[in-house]
């Protein structure tokens, strides 16, 4: 996660936490009818925001793949990247029905 994305996520967490705290205080101080109306409006706004974010995620262009540097060989050849010279992968042979 990039630094900017992390800041945006934390910003949303703080804003939503403050909104929940505000609704809790409003429920304690005001009557339940007023609190229910405000919670309904807040839920509607949150639902529209979620729909907008979902639409953006569906319509945005795909991200470019990240280029990874090739893995280096460890000492004594214990780990190395796969290469074309390694040959083909072994074929998976299905078990015969008589073996079942």
Image (cartoon, rainbow, N blue to C red):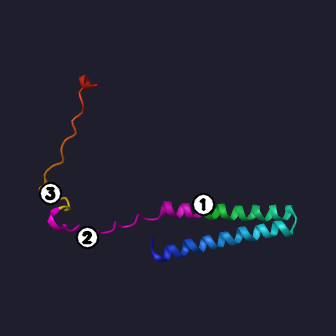
Tag nearer the camera, 1 or 2: 2
**Mark 1 packing: few (<14 Cα in 10 Å), some, or many (20+)?**
few
**Which span is picked out in magenta?**
50-77
Residue depicted at x 70% and y 61%? 44
Residue 68 lies in the magenta-colored region? yes
Foreground residue, 11 or 71? 71
Residue 64 lies in the magenta-colored region? yes
If you read the primary sequence from the N terminus, does the residue marked by circle 1 or circle 3 appear first? 1
Q: Position of residue 84 (x, y in %)?
A: 14, 57
Q: Which residue is mark 3?
A: 84
Q: Which residue is mark 1?
A: 51
**Mark 3 packing: few (<14 Cα in 10 Å), some, or many (20+)?**
few
Foreground residue, 88 or 51? 88
Image side of residue 45 versus residue 67, left or right = right
Q: Which residue is mark 2?
A: 69
Q: Position of residue 69 (x, y in %)?
A: 25, 70
Residue depicted at x 86% and y 68%? 30
Q: How far apart are the two marked residues, 1 and 2, measured between alpha carbons?
A: 38 Å
| Quarter of the rendering containing residue 14 | bottom right
């Amino acid at each position: 996660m990039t630094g900017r994305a992390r800041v945006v996520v934390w910003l949303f967490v703080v804003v939503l936490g403050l909104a929940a705290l505000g609704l809790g205080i409003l429920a304690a101080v005001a009557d339940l009818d007023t609190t229910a109306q405000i919670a309904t409006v807040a839920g509607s706004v949150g639902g529209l925001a979620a729909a907008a974010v979902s639409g953006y995620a569906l319509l945005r262009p795909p991200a470019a793949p990240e280029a990874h540097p090739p893995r280096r060989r460890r000492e004594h050849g214990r780990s190395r990247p796969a290469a074309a010279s390694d040959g083909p992968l072994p074929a998976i042979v299905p078990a015969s029905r008589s073996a079942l």
